[in-house]
Amino acid sequence: MQYWLMKSEPNVWSIEQQKKVGAKGTTWDGVRNYQAANNLKQMKKGDLCFFYHSNIGKEIVGIVEVIRTAFIDPSDKQKKFVAVQVKYKRVLKKAISLENIKKNKDLQHLLLIKQSRLSVMPIDSKSWKILNKMSSI
């Protein structure tokens, strides 16, 4: 299993909206950055992803699971980019702010800090554990 972080502006698509969709999940589409799209292509069924509210909030708020691997993004008229299907798993007990992530010396290598505009990124298992622990403190 691999771990990821996916960003969404909460006024466009929030963790609450993801939760309402239920088990059938929703298409994670609209990714037009090649690096982020390549990350989508690497996702496997069952992978877990942190759900990050970008711009408004700037915090990890929940977890979603990949339930369908990469397919042509239906919102891409040129058929160059991919999407995945994800379903809601849970809301974090405590959201993890970008500010607190930046304060943790063991998380300084994360692309969330180094490439802040990247919308889909891998998270190593050690960082996944640290972030989950931060969400329950």
Image: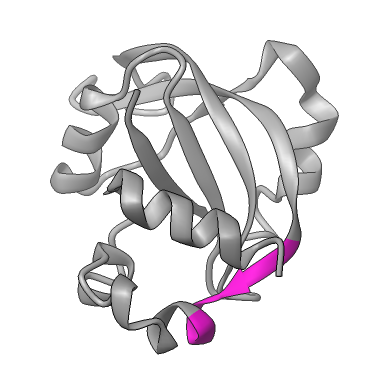
Front residue (pair 95, 121): 95
Residue 6 on the magenta segment: no
In terms of image quadrants, where is residue 56?
bottom right
Front residue (pair 42, 55): 42
x 33%, y 52%: residue: 126
Q: Is residue 10 visible?
A: yes
In terms of image quadrants, where is residue 119?
bottom left
x 31%, y 74%: residue: 106
Front residue (pair 108, 136): 136
Front residue (pair 77, 32): 32
Q: Tell me which colouring the rendered structure shows.
A: one colour
Q: Is residue 51 left or right of residue 57?
A: left
Region in magenta = 94-100
Image coordinates for residue 79, horizontal then vertical, percent? 23, 19
Residue 98 on the magenta segment: yes
Q: Is residue 17 left or right of residue 127?
A: right
